[in-house]
Image (cartoon, helix red, strand yellow):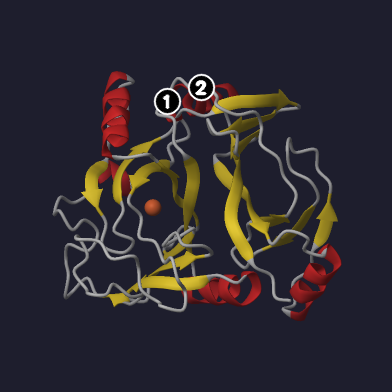
Amino acid sequence: MAISAKRVGHATFETPDLDKAIAYYTNVNGLVLSEKQNGRAYLASKTGLLSIVLEQGNAAQLKRLSFEVSPNTDFGDMAKQLSTHGVRSEVRTDAIPGVGKLLTFIDPAGTAVELFADWSYLGAHHQVHGAGPLKFGHIARVVDDPKKMAEFYCNVLGFRVSDWIDDYFVFLRCNPDHHTVNFIRGPKTGMHHIAFEMKDFAHIQNACELLALRKMPINWGPIRHGPGHNVAIYHRNADDQNVEFYIELDQMKDEELGYYDPRPWHHDTPQRPKVWSPKENPNLGNLWGLPPAPDFHR
Ligand SMILES: [Fe+2]
């Protein structure tokens, strides 16, 4: 049975200032600090989903990305599957709160991927101080070759292509969400942004007010993206990484039908996966028009 990623679990970041990063994720983003030990911090959403792991280190960078796979997956079978694609993997039983056994390997852009099937909530109904997203929803990365990454994530982990922008930006889904991972071509490989799902537009507005009070300017938004049609705002976190809060991401509720759940803001009827052309649609980044502030691309 092919490997089937079901959702993104947690992302692990190295940070040069662990306490500052924890302060951002708890007081601004609105996660809860579940555990801190040996230079590592584990942050959960208010629902109790482990979302972000921080590690004290030299640089601010993405280290690892985890995905939940089908329940009862045989880890031996999964390792065999990976080896047929020339990928070496190993089973790890890291003491990550709430997460059981992991199968880890390095993806073609050099980030460690951790697959897990067993997990539990880290508490529930947490009171949070910051914006308080519903979940960690997607991660966009800058890579040399987005086509190669798309083929790898589709062939090896069961992702599907949701949209392309020309041949330089691909959006991939592993569940009804339009995208869980994105790859954009760029000279400097690394993270492009991480994104958290909010409840509704009022929740986005609350986040705008909170960011203003924390003197953390929004560097793009509120906008409505073309691909994915999510309403979004962006800001930079304590490690100078772009963070997105979004709502209304396109949903592919039925893979056989092959179109996104119809919405009044769709320009195509039905809205199907396609290649978006910036020449034909210069506003595809933001259908409402406003371009990002220079700080977004910095
Ligand atoms: Fe995004």
Q: Dot 2 surroundings within 10 Å: few (below 14), some, or many (20 or more)?
A: some
Q: Residue at x 55, y 26 (%)?
A: 125
The image position of residue 22, as x and y in percent, is 55, 25
Q: Dot 1 surroundings within 10 Å: few (below 14), some, or many (20 or more)?
A: many
Is residue 24 left or right of 12 when viewed as pictured? left
Residue 77, can we see it?
A: yes
Residue for badge 2: 23
Residue 145, can we see it?
A: no
* Label 1 to label 2: alpha-carbon separation: 8 Å
Q: Residue at x 66, y 55 (%)?
A: 68
- Residue type, mark 1 in image: Val
Q: Secondary structure at mark 1?
A: helix
Q: Which mark is residue 182?
A: none
Is residue 216 left or right of 103 when viewed as pictured? left
The image position of residue 40, as x and y in percent, is 69, 31
Q: Secondary structure at mark 2?
A: helix
Task: Point out the residue furthest to the left here.
Answer: 289
Residue for badge 1: 28
Above or below for 91 versus 42: below
- Asked if the residues shown at circle 1 and circle 2 are in contact, with their CB atoms under 8 angstroms apart, the answer is yes
The image position of residue 168, as x and y in percent, is 38, 71
- Residue type, mark 2 in image: Ala
Above or below for 293 versus 151: above
Q: Quadrant of residue 159?
A: bottom right
The yes-or-no answer for disc 2 within 8 Å of ligand 1 is: no
Q: Residue at x 45, y 71 (%)?
A: 254
Q: Residue at x 19, y 60 (%)?
A: 265
The yes-or-no answer for disc 1 within 8 Å of ligand 1 is: no
Q: Quadrant of residue 251?
A: bottom left
Q: Earlier in the sequence, mark 1 or mark 2?
A: 2
Q: Nearer the viewer, residue 277 or 45?
A: 45
The image position of residue 141, as x and y in percent, is 48, 57
